[in-house]
Amino acid sequence: MSNKILIDVFGSKNKYPVSSGCGCGSQLTMWEMYLEFSDLVENSDIKDLVELRFMDVDEIALESYDNIINALASGYSLPLTTIDSNVRYQLSIPYDHIYRSIKRHIK
């Protein structure tokens, strides 16, 4: 068992996050967002503290993830980012927020 903090990003690899209609939505697919996030983590001081996974909702057995099913049923949108199985963010993968959360967690 790993002592690392698990960060899962649930999304659909080739799809873009839902836009609010203002034209300000992401220009990156959910997979591209994850890769960008992963690069930031890999070049930071938290890289050895976390384990990152992209969970493609089109390829996994979603029924195994009650937290994701409940979030989607409640109106949350992909991508969903979890930290140790707790849904924390939707529609983006906010590196700065996640970084600060991890730093607070390890204090």
Image: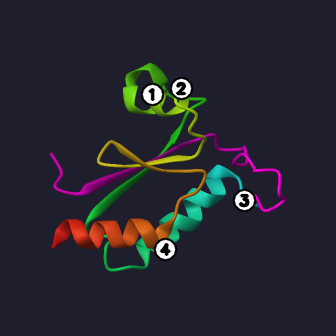
Q: Which residues are magenta?
A: 1-25
Cα separation, mark 4 vs mark 3, equals 16 Å
Q: Position of residue 60 (x, y in %)?
A: 50, 28
Identify residue type, mark 4.
Answer: Leu
Does residue 13 show up magenta in the picture? yes
Name which of mark 4 and mark 3 comes first in the sequence: 3
Crowding at dot 1, Cα within 10 Å, few <14 / some 14-19 / many 20+, comes out as few
Q: Of residues 61 and 18, which is closer to you in this image? A: 18
Instruction: Give the residue number, with chain letter if any, for mark 2.
Output: 73
Q: Position of residue 83 (x, y in %)?
A: 34, 51
Question: Which image quadrant for residue 106?
Answer: bottom left
Disc 4 element: helix
Identify residue type, mark 2.
Answer: Ala
Q: Is residue 70 above or below residue 105?
A: above
Q: Position of residue 98 (x, y in %)?
A: 40, 65
Question: Which image quadrant for residue 5?
Answer: bottom left
Instruction: Give the residue number, with chain letter if any, for mark 4.
Output: 40
Crowding at dot 4, Cα within 10 Å, few <14 / some 14-19 / many 20+, comes out as some
Q: Is residue 45 above or below residue 28?
A: below
Identify residue type, mark 1.
Answer: Asn
Residue at 78% across, 62% down: 24
Disc 2 element: helix
Residue at 45% across, 33% down: 68
Quadrant containing the C terminus is bottom left
Cα separation, mark 2 vs mark 1, equals 5 Å
| Tag of residue 28 | 3
Instruction: Give the residue number, with chain letter if any, for mark 1.
Output: 70
Name which of mark 2 and mark 4 comes first in the sequence: 4
